[in-house]
Image (tube, helix red, strand yellow):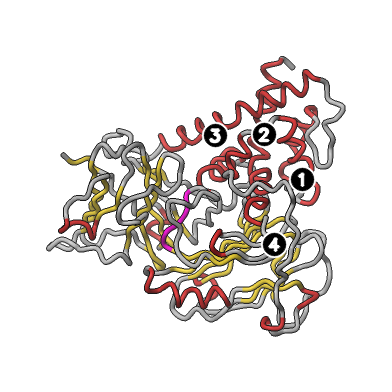
Amino acid sequence: MTDESLEKLATEAWIYGYPLVTAAMTKGSMTAVPARDDAHRKAPVNQFCYMRATPDASFTEVVSPNADTLYSSAWLDLSDQPLVLTLPDFGDRFWMVPILDAWSDVCAVVGRRKNGPSTGPFLIAGPSWSGPTPPGLTLLKSPTVVNWIIARYATSGPSDFPSVNRLQDATRLIPLSEWTGDPDDYIPPTDVAVPADADTTTPPVDKVHTLSGREYFTLLNRMMVDNPPAPADAPVLGRVAKLGIAPGASLDDLSPEELATLDAGARRGPGVLRDLLARAESAGSGGWTVHRGLGDYGTDYAKRAVITRFGYGANLDADALYPHATTDADGRPLDGAHTYVLHFDAGETPPVDGFWSLTMMNEHQLFADNPLNRYAIGDRSGMRTNPDGSLDIYVQHESPGTERESNWLPAPAGSFNVFLRLYWPKQPALAGDWTPPALRRTS
């Protein structure tokens, strides 16, 4: 193989392993505390942290955050034993608890759509566990040792936070060896050892993108031991094995030239991700792209890596759709130097059984600071409709005026993009019979 073809293969391997390396970095960043720290959105492994309020512009741990729900987040390590997940009665509130495996696929999900107001408790077990499921527990089997739970509870705003906080407190994880049948019998440890070299300030994506080829693929090889690739990955693993990339493999015997090839692949990877996203977004209609098949990627490693980079933690289509716009109705990039209107005719707002919102992202796929501390607007925001029943959302940097601020989604001064989030979408949205109207630039 030529040097160029080897570098392309190394880049392919970088893309393939991207979710697993990102999981390792994100887990390390979000669990490097001795005890649960809700204020900083961190907790030790196998413990929930409860995000008591929606994220603001200071939140950088995960790209494309959500301002419509409160989260309970937990990183799992199932290498020693399974965990028991207990849940409260949610009443008529929309809720969902997806479990992502280490490759970013949704390996299990419980929630309002499937289970109604209450369900559980559940036993979450890793790939090597084969013990009997205790009576009263429902088994959820994960193909990997590392998992990420991102429980979501719909909220109507700060006045509703205390009610959601009580539901969060009843969302718990208990090691199977400590399970008595009563979740109140277990008290999580508060003195967990933290690695001395833990970096909790650098965003995980920055850590991933600055790894050398040797660092990146050494971590990937190690992670693939307890988080095995899917059987369908055999062809790509066969191709990259010639670069020393395989579960448990060492790179110590590679030549300087071979290590340089891995470095070249790691350098090219972030740019390839940006190009892949640009191509995917350019296929959108009316400025919107709806990425389908999220949370269940199969062998579409490019899509899996792009979503990990720009929307880590995405749900299955049946639970949520995320139309994404980077351009206006005329194909021009969205920019805070201009003003825009998103207009819904009467009866044509997003069709959902859960809820919907329009969420603002800056060029880093994070929330942008603004005078209202408003990062999303939707069906629970108290927007005013027009006399004919239609709805206008004003998307711009400066206020559209006091009389329109109820419908204003503030934009940053520069480049931005927006997500429509449809939770529990109805069939017209799932089938593509309903599509969002285009954002139109106004004078």
The picture quadrant where one finds residue 136 is bottom right
Which residue is the extreme one toward the left? 387
Q: Mark 2 points at which residue?
A: 211
Query: Between marks 4 and 1, how big is the CA–CA gap?
Result: 27 Å
Asked if marks 1 and 2 touch (Cβ < 8 Å), the reply is no
Image quarter (top left, top right, bottom left or bottom right) of the N terminus: top right
**Is 275 a magenta residue?**
no
Q: Mark 1 points at which residue?
A: 224
Three-letter code for the amino acid on which mark 2 is drawn: Leu
User: Going 65% across and 46% down the picture, which residue do you hit?
Assistant: 199
User: Going 68% across and 61% down the picture, which residue do you hit?
Assistant: 44
Q: Which mark is residue 439?
A: none
Q: Position of residue 229 (x, y in %)?
A: 74, 46
Question: Mark 3 or mark 4, which is nearer the start of the sequence?
Answer: 4
Three-letter code for the amino acid on which mark 3 is drawn: Leu
Q: Residue 34 carries which label?
A: 4
Question: Mark 1 or mark 4, which is nearer the start of the sequence?
Answer: 4
Q: Mark 3 points at which residue?
A: 273
